[in-house]
């Protein structure tokens, strides 16, 4: 096994760009008018803690900012992406420990209300593989972004894996093998979900949350990017606090 990337977040989230170091491994994705997204990250004894920038004035708890009326809502309220890791045709394993608390949600176990996420992204193929942790469940998210010119279709799935409580901490690993075009989700050491033809729709089981017609060839990733995110479909004053333990990317063996 070869370790391609590792971050224990002892120094917090080391971010490139204005105010950050040019050699830092992480970059932040904007959300609407928020250049760094709707989130802050800090180092704690428990790990990296990420939470929204706003505060619920009634409770003092973290809360997503509500975009102005008429502004499109980006479901990625905060996202950080690490370095691209070459597969070299071999399996890559992405692992981290995750925990999440959800505040002020009408349905704390639903991804749409708010979740903390471990992301694995194939930028070239538009393939997205996630572990999402809500207040009441752990989820597998699997999707593909459609091409704007219609040359590639798209889809998204959200698959519930297990129930959880806010105090639970989970070891999450995603193993992606370009040679076999497979991806596996491992939760606390056990396989809980798999995709057998990476880049294509699931043949049966869960129905897609969204679907865009178009070609969907199988994907053999040349490089994959690790990421972290806070997501919600409709900010209304709820919030998510994500705690992340050491994150590692390794080549050549399953987690």
Image (cartoon, rainbow, N blue to C red):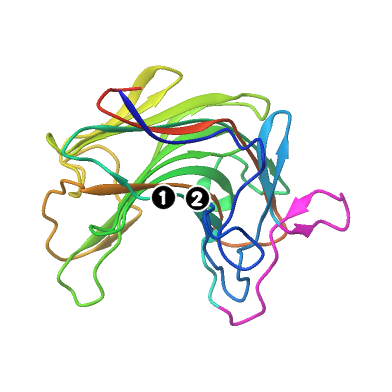
Disc 2 and disc 1 in contact, CB within 8 angstroms: yes
* In front of the other: 208 or 16: 16
What residue sits 31% from the left and 29% below the top?
Answer: 193
Vertical arrangement, residue 60 with respect to residue 180, above or below: below
Farthest-out residue, top: 189
**Numbered circle sitting on residue 83:** 1
Asked if the magenta segment contains residue 66, the reply would be yes
Name which quarter of the figure residue 31 lies in: bottom right
* In front of the other: 52 or 213: 52
What secondary structure is marked by label 1?
Answer: loop
Asked if the magenta segment contains residue 70, the reply would be yes
What residue sits 55% from the left and 59% below the top?
Answer: 16
What residue sits 86% from the left and 50% below the top?
Answer: 60
Q: Dot 2 corresponds to which residue?
A: 25
Q: Which residues are magenta?
A: 53-71
Name which quarter of the figure residue 204 lies in: top left
CA gap between label 2 and label 1 equals 6 Å
User: How many other residues sit within 10 Å of disc 1, few (<14), some (14-19) or many (≥20)?
Assistant: some
What residue sits 19% from the left and 43% below the top?
Answer: 198
Vertical arrangement, residue 114 with respect to residue 136, above or below: below
**Numbered circle sitting on residue 238:** none
Q: Main secondary structure of the magenta part?
A: loop
What secondary structure is marked by label 2?
Answer: loop
Name which quarter of the figure residue 101 lies in: top right
- x and y percentages locating residue 89 in the rendered image: 16, 38
Q: Is residue 55 left or right of residue 75?
A: right
Quadrant housing the N terminus = top left
- x and y percentages locating residue 59 in the rendered image: 87, 49
């Amino acid at each position: 096994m070869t370790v391609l990337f590792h971050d224990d977040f002892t120094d917090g989230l080391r971010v490139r760009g204005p105010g950050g170091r040019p050699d830092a491994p992480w970059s932040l994705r904007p959300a609407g008018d928020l250049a760094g997204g709707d989130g802050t990250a800090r180092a704690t004894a428990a790990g990296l803690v990420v939470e929204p920038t706003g505060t619920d004035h009634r409770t003092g708890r973290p809360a997503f900012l509500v975009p102005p009326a008429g502004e499109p809502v980006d479901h990625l309220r905060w996202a950080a992406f690490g370095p691209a890791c070459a597969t070299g045709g071999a399996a890559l394993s992405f692992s981290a420990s995750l925990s999440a608390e959800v505040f002020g949600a009408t349905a704390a176990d639903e991804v749409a209300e708010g979740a903390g996420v471990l992301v694995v992204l194939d930028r070239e193929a538009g393939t997205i593989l996630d572990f999402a942790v809500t207040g009441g469940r752990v989820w597998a998210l699997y999707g593909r972004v459609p091409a704007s010119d219609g040359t590639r279709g798209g889809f998204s799935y959200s698959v519930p894996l297990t129930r959880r409580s806010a105090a639970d901490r989970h070891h999450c690993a995603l193993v992606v093998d370009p040679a076999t075009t497979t991806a596996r989700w491992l939760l606390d050491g056990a396989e809980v979900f798999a995709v057998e033809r990476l880049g294509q729709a699931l043949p049966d089981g869960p129905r897609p949350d969204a679907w865009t017609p178009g070609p969907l060839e199988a994907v053999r990733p040349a490089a994959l990017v690790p990421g972290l995110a806070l997501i919600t479909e409709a900010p209304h004053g709820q919030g998510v606090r994500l705690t992340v333990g050491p994150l590692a990317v390794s080549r050549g063996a399953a987690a």
